[in-house]
Image: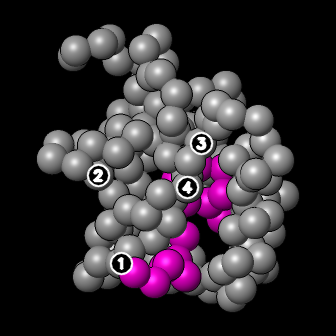
Amino acid sequence: MLEPPYLFVYGTLRASAGTEWSRFLTAASRFVGSGRTRGELFHLDGYPGTTVRAGDDAWVSGEVYLLNDPVSALSRLNEYEGCSPSDPPPHEFERQVVTVLLDAGGTVQAWAYIYSLETAGKARIVPGDYLRPGSAAPVWRAETPNS
């Protein structure tokens, strides 16, 4: 299987987050559109992390980018996400391919940084959107386990 040239981002890499790394991504890619993937979003230490939840009705909202030079961009982003070969395991995030439903219609296979550690005790971000439109303020509320 060919590796996808797309990246799905749901937190600090989204354009409206206004971070140094969101600006890097904007310069290293072309915005494809907004979309969502199946998963649950959690509030970590000042940033979000998503888990994959395939058969569930939980969704994570984000943006899809077509990377200009996927190998170079992903190498740099792996360093930012703490999952490069030089980062000691266990890695907080792993880069995985997810299916993204685009808001404009259709689907795309895209890389995403998936949270790989335990989520017990982490506040779930409901309804799965880390940023308010046009705002860099996180939107989240705690959800008790099994609720």
Q: Which mark is residue 95?
A: 4
- Closer to viewer: mark 2 or mark 3: 3
Q: CA distance from mark 3 to mark 4?
A: 7 Å
Kindly state the secondary structure of the residue where label 4 is placed: strand
Which residue, given by chain and number where applicable, does mark 2 sit on? 38
Circle 3/circle 4 CB separation < 8 Å: yes
Q: Is residue 74 left or right of residue 109?
A: right
Q: Residue at x 51, y 35 (%)?
A: 116
Q: Earlier in the sequence, mark 1 or mark 4?
A: 4
Q: Which mark is residue 126?
A: none
Q: Which residues are magenta?
A: 1-17
Which quadrant is the N terminus positioned in? bottom left
Which residue, given by chain and number where applicable, does mark 1 sit on? 108
Q: CA distance from mark 1 to mark 4?
A: 16 Å
Is residue 146 on the magenta stretch? no
Would you say residue 131 is visible in this rendering? no
